[in-house]
Amino acid sequence: MASPPKPAITVLATAFGELKLDEVVSFTTTRNLPSRRVMQRVGMTHDPSEDFDHPRVDDGPLRRHVLYRLSRAEWELSQPTTVAGTVRVGTEVPTPSLVLSPGTHTVPSFLVGVGS
């Protein structure tokens, strides 16, 4: 499976980090398979019992929508952590865990998770 798109990860990182939301929901038409795949790739889950007919869409093939959810707890479990815990991408951290050189360096995003 392909990795999640960076913009979707950025939105979730902001929602759970800066905004401290407990949950993020997303919805789209049942036929919008590319959007549904993005939701799945970022870890969102779909419960068919929550699907709905969008009140602002006329009857037709685009009226039925699917709802996906991701909780803060699910997000945090999916994020890699360092020995010292989770740090915000781009945050400067002491280097002993990376053994680069004395001082402080920016940690590449692939080495750490995004957190609050």
Image (tube, rainbow, N blue to C red):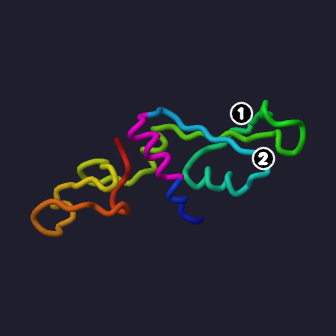
Residue at the spot 41% in from the left edge and 51% down from the top edge? 79
Q: Secondary structure at mark 1?
A: helix
Relative to 93, say whether 50 is above or below. Answer: above
Image location (x, y in percent) of residue 9: 49, 52
Residue at the spot 34% in from the left edge and 56% down from the top edge? 112
Label number found at residue 50: 1
Residue at the spot 16% in from the left edge and 56% down from the top edge? 94
Relative placement, left or right, of 10 versus 82 is right
Reading the chain from its start, which is encountered first: label 1 or label 2? 2
Q: Looking at the image, which is closer to me, 13 or 83?
A: 13
Image location (x, y in percent) of residue 21: 46, 33
Image location (x, y in percent) of residue 89: 34, 54
Relative to 110, say whether 45 is above or below. Answer: above
The image quarter in which residue 1 lies: bottom right
Residue picked out by circle 2: 30
Q: Main secondary structure of the magenta part?
A: helix
Q: Amino acid at mark 1?
A: Glu
Which residue is farthest left?
102
Image location (x, y in percent) of residue 27: 68, 41
Mark 2 nearby-residue class (10 Å; few <14, some 14–19, many ≥20): some
Point out the stretch of residues depicted in magenta: 8-20
Q: Marks 1 and 2, how far apart in space?
A: 12 Å
Mark 1 nearby-residue class (10 Å; few <14, some 14–19, many ≥20): few
Q: Is residue 6 magenta?
A: no
Q: Is residue 16 magenta?
A: yes
Relative placement, left or right, of 39 versus 87 is right
Relative to 106, say whether 100 is above or below. Answer: below
Q: Amino acid at mark 2?
A: Thr
Relative placement, left or right, of 38 versus 116 is right
Q: Secondary structure at mark 2?
A: loop
Q: Looking at the image, which is closer to me, 115 or 81?
A: 115
